[in-house]
Amino acid sequence: MSRNETDEQQHHRGLQDTQVLKDLMAEVDKMATDLGDALLHEQPKSEKDALDHEEQWHTALQQAMGNSPDPMNDWEAPINSSLPRKKDDLQKKIDNHFDIALRQIAFVSHLNQNWIPKIHENINEDNRRQMMLRSEHAKIAKSFACAYQHATAWRMLKDFRDNSPAARQEKANQAKQEIKDEKEVMLRALIKGALSKHRPSGGWERYDLAAPVIANILHPLIKEYSLPLPDDIDLLSEKIQKLIFTEPRLRKVYNENGIQPVPEPHKSRTINLFSR
C-alpha cells in the first residue's frame, strides 16, 4: 500500500469521524433544546408566561454568545443537596440553578449552530480544524452534562419548596438518582444515533450482537474527546446491551432497525402451592 493510499484512508476516516461527531452533537443539541423548553414551561404559570420565556431564553443566549458571565465558569459551580433554612436563600438557590441550566443549554446551542459551522467554513487545514472541533465538542459535552445537573437540582429544590414533606423526599431521592445517572443521558443519545446511522444492510441481527459493534464505533470517540462515558470497551458494550434491553425508547429504535425485536423483559410471577 502506497503512502498516498494511506493518507487517503486517513483523510476518509477523519471525514467519517467528523460526521459521526456532527450527528452526535446535533442529537445533544436537540436534547438540550428539549430540556430548556421543558424547564421554561415547568415554571409556575402564575409567575411566567410566553413573553417571559422568550425574554429568559434571549438573555441566556446573549450571555452564552457574549461570555458575560462566562458559561465555562458555570462548570465549577457547586451542586449539593443542602437546603437553606431561610425562604429567600432557598429561592435564590433555585433561581441560580435555573439560570445556570438555561445558560448552559444556550451555550450548547450557540456552539453547535453558530461556532462549529464557522470552523468548518473557515479552517481548511485538516489537523487544525480537527483540533478546534475536538475542543468545541468537548465543551458541548461538558455543557450539556452541566445543564442536566443544574436542571435536576432546580427541579428538586422547586419541588421541595412547593410540595408536602413526603413528596419532597420522593422528589429528592429521584433527583439524586438522576444526577447519579447523568452519564447515561449522553450514552443513550449516542446509542440512539448509532442504531439507525450504523444499521447494517438488512438490519441488526440481534440486539446483543449490535452492542459490541456500537461499542467499537463509540469507543474511539469517547477516548479521543474525553466524553464522560465508560472508557473500557467491554464495560461499554455491556452497558449498551443493557440499555437497549431496558430503555423503552432504545428498544423502539432498535426494533425499527433490527431483524428480530428485542425480547420483552420477563416479569416474575409468584405461584403459591397449597397442600391438601
Image: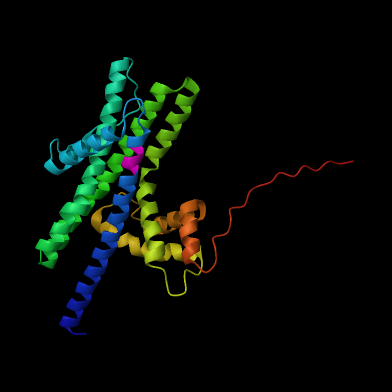
Q: Residue furthest right?
A: 276
For the point 37% across and 31% down, which residue is it? 155
Q: Quadrant of the C terminus?
A: top right
Which secondary structure dominates the residues rendered in magenta? Answer: helix
Q: Report if residue 141 lies within the magenta region.
A: no
* Res 267 seen here: yes
Q: Measured from the top left, where is residue 27 in percent x and y?
A: 32, 54
* Vertical side of 112 occupied by 94: above or below: above
For the point 26% across and 68% down, which residue is it? 16
* Res 136 seen here: no
> Is 31 displayed left or right of 255 in the figure?
left
For the point 17% across and 56% down, which residue is it? 116
Query: Which range of residues does the magenta coloring cover?
Result: 35-39
Quadrant of res 176: top left
* Vertical side of 240 occupied by 171: above or below: above
For the point 21% across and 44% down, which residue is it? 107
Q: Report if residue 38 lies within the magenta region.
A: yes
Q: Nearer the viewer, residue 251 or 245?
A: 251
> Is 204 displayed left or right of 37 in the figure?
right
Q: Measured from the top left, where is residue 56 in percent x and y?
A: 24, 35
Q: Quadrant of the N terminus?
A: bottom left
Q: Nearer the viewer, residue 156 or 112?
A: 112
